[in-house]
Image (tube, grey):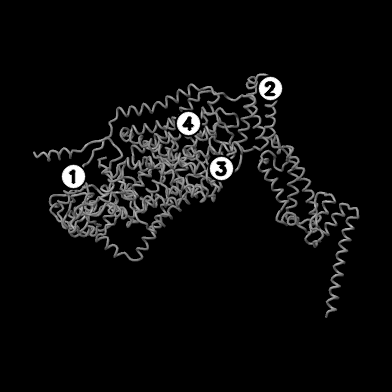
Amino acid sequence: MHPSLLQDSVRGCPKEIPHNEKLLSLKYESLDYDNSENQLFLEEERRMSFLGFKCLEISRWVICGLIGFLTGLIACCIDIAVENLAGVKYYVVKQNIEKFTEVGGLSISLILWAVLNSAFVMLGAVIVAFFEPGAAGSGIPQIKCYLNGVKIPRVVRLKTLVVKVCGVICSVAGGLAVGKEGPMIHSGAVVAAGVSQGRSTSLKKDFKIFEYFRRDTEKRDFVSAGAAAGVSAAFGAPVGGVLFSLEEGASFWNQMLTWRIFFASMISTFTLNFFLSIYNNKPGDLSSPGLINFGRFESDVSVCLLLSSPKPCGLLGALFNILNYWLTIFRIRYVHRPCLQVMEAMLVAAVTATVSFAMIYFSNDCQPLGPDQSEDYPLQLFCADGEYNSMATAFFNTPERSVRSLFHNPPGRLFYNPLTLSLFTLTYFFLACWTYGLTVSAGVFIPSLLIGAHRTLARLVSIMFVCRSLSQVWAVPGKYAFNGSCRGIVRMTLSLTVIMVEATGNVTYGLPIMLVLLTAKIVGDYFVEGLYDIHIKLQSVPFLHLEAPATSHWLTAREVMGAPVTCFNRIEKVGTIVDVLSNTSTNHNLGKICGLILRSQLIVLLKHKVRELARSRLTQRKLQLKDFRDAYPRFPPIQSIHVSQDERECMMDLTEFMNPTPYTVPQETSLPRVFKLFRALGLRHLVVVDSENRVVGLVTRKDLARYHLGKHGLEEMQLAQT
Amino acid sequence: MYIFQVVALLIALLYYGNAQTSTVAVNHTILGSELSADGLKQLAAIVAPQSPVFHPSRGSYFSLNLLSAFPEDLEVSDYCVELLAIFGQRYSTYVNCLVSAARPVKVCQNCYGSYDNLMDIYTNISSDQMGPGNVSCRDSLLRSDRLMLVFLLYNNLEDIWTGSECNSCVSLGLHSLTNDTLYFMATLNQSLRCFEKFQQGNHSALCKECKATYRGLNELYSRMEKNRTLCIDIEDSMNMTRRLWSKNFNCSFPRAENVPVIAVSSFMLFLPIIFYLSSFLHSEQKKRKLIHRE
């Protein structure tokens, strides 16, 4: 044998390596955002009257309103359910503690608390791990990828929504160090994807409306609206929601889309506000625009101190991300069986309860109750009568309540003394770092706020000031805490700034917040990326960033593209098509750049053809666009279509169904230029042609996402099977 | 023509001189005579629209520049002036009572009578009914100027009354304290007597003997808290008693269970370590198959 051939075969043997972040998975495809303008589509456009177009536009608005309304309702349900469940749990534990404080046997209370926590979290983890693993985590990385154009499997299904909502209720009621904001965004996106299609594939019900929108193009736009509605319901920040969607998803600036997204967000926050006011028996109060409520902050002159906290925050955020990164890698490599994942979640819940109990038990900090704390569960434990353990207000509460009490404590009462605060911060930091990445539905925003809020020096300084002088200048330490919150963890700068400004209700804080965020981001980015980006990379998703990596102009399309490309003739034998589809798993293109056809389209064609041949000639009918739309989004695999020998010999005319005008680039186009075109238009395939317009290769998402700027210049990621 | 102007000027001068002398005469008459309260009121009716309620010294009154006379329909009628005087008296009585009951707080028990009186007179003033002579005191006393002093003063006191939640302790109609309040006071007195008995010597004896009464008091207080029949008097007295019990006599529970709690906590903290170690050692590491491009 020729020695080079031998070498080739050895080199061609696939290696196996442990999972790391520098891999790209093959299982992620792009969304078909670019419309396939075949003859069927053009005919439909011609047939539609002006009135028809107007109706479409109006139905888009109606759908966006409906999305906002349903998202607000879901947020309301989550909030009420968590409040009630957590209320029951804390009530039971509190009764138990009060019974045993005098008599002795507090370790039984500890065990009871741990068991209750584990029970709730076990339920949440079981439904996520066994029924829908796609609902794990906060959901923001998945939605970011979806808006980027990656088709994450099962991310916008009804089952995912149900599992996510139940999961987040169980996680928060189970006392984990988590928030419910991230899952809210994911839920909003799923609601949008479901409502805009006018049918439910899981429940097999078709309402026969919105059939025009059964395409990836429209669906992705509606999912942006849903994500914005989710953000707005979670934080009470509609504009922040719009900016989040645009920051993550917008390929190009579409003004009507922005309008509709804004409409959906507004409706969402208003619905939530309205129903929560009714639930709290204060209709017309309209004081809870979001799931998390910071209350109102008044302007104050002392803004300079706000800027002193970003450096430590950036560093802390970087530390959090690094720890979480190593933990996630460990989990992916070693804790991958569902039973193990459930057990891990239960252990985390039990340890959270244990740590909280120990902190409360050994704390000597006693403070009298304030007038505005009737809903909390004050624990007296070993304090004097009339005073209550202040560690308990931090630990013996859902994280949202802790945040609210922290930001709105009248400083004269000195509710949190520095020792209590520091201990709480440290504990919560490690708990939150440990909890994120578990196989439960949970977000990380509230924990990061709590950590940063406690840690900021300004808060401690302000408390000391109040100790000494009781002056009103530092009267509201809450807002310094707020500003220093570790947004060094999450790093979505623009949308986060606006969300914060809207949540505090005071535009005066806009500039300090923005500066702090930017500084924290710069400091943190020096060490490590944002948390969601880390998780996206660890899932090996081919994520396209805003721009191509710098210094990549020397790469051309020819080096980047995938070749060879499978070609069909215009009129092709059925047998050939079936063989090609069965053999490989990529999508194909057609001819001497006559056009582009997708695997999904070919499968629908084959199915229809086979069915047609089975019937008699009289009842044959032409394939309509409706048939493609009905098959969307879950196209059957090629194995489910049975083609007999006779049928294999028939010819199929692909002219009507192919996309006759796909985007093409010449071979010598540089990588940044290809990248810009690909990302701006949301393409799935980009055909590379030579000077005679012959197909040379095909650029897909994986080809572009492979290149990134590493520590030693341009690096290429490897593809792996996951 | 020239003569006409001179004559007009002379006449104007004459009138001005007359006016001056007449006011001077008024001033002299005021300074000269002995004035009674009635006299003052009459003068006030002529010279000023409002009269001071409290009896000021002559000196302070005359320091006001009341040389102009307001027409009759802007004056306050006598009836209203009387009402205002009564209001002032009752106001100062109530405030005196409040201040003397400030610490320890007994504002509800001691002062509900005065508040009742004050409320009566104010309702009278602010009612829509016309008094004798067809005058409504409400507009003239309460709403005639920017300050609205009477309204402000009464509202402040009303806020104090509402803030101390005295309505929960005093029966409707403000005639007496409620039964609950009286019962609480009796129980409280019982506990305090018990404290006094055992105050000398070792506090541990006190803690043991008075525990039952103190517990009873606490439970009664919690019940009243749930029913919301608390007023500031009860809250404060309870607060003081609790402070006595916990801080002065040191009778609250000590932390006695350190060892079991630490043991259980360490066990719980140990479990995850075992879990991770075992999964590290026993699970198969998930490997990824690399795909090479041709």
Give above or below for A506 relative to A374: below
Give the letter of the chain under mark 3.
Answer: A
Say which label, 1 or 2, has the lower sequence index: 2
Tell me the element at label 3. Answer: loop
**Residue placed most toward the observer, A473 or A212:** A473
Give the letter of the chain under mark 1.
Answer: B
* Residue B122 screen position, x and y as percent: 74, 49
Amino acid type, callout 1: Glu
Q: Residue furthest right?
A: B33
Task: Tell me whether marks 1 and 4 sit on the same chain.
Answer: no
Spatial CA distance of label 3 from label 4 is: 27 Å
Spatial CA distance of label 1 from label 4 is: 56 Å
Task: Tell me whether marks 2 and 3 sit on the same chain.
Answer: no
Q: Which quadrant would residue B266 be assigned to in this image? A: top left
Give above or below for A209 relative to B273: below
Q: Residues within 10 Å of mark 3 (few under 14, many from 20)?
A: many
Q: Residues within 10 Å of mark 1 (few under 14, many from 20)?
A: few
Amino acid type, callout 3: Val
Q: Which quadrant would residue A64 be assigned to in this image? A: bottom left
Residue to which mark 2 is pinned: B199
Amino acid type, callout 4: Ser
In this image, A479 relative to B157: left or right? left
- Numbered badge on residue A476: 3
- Residue A156 in sight from this viewpoint: no
Residue to which mark 1 is pinned: B294
Spatial CA distance of label 3 from label 1 is: 64 Å
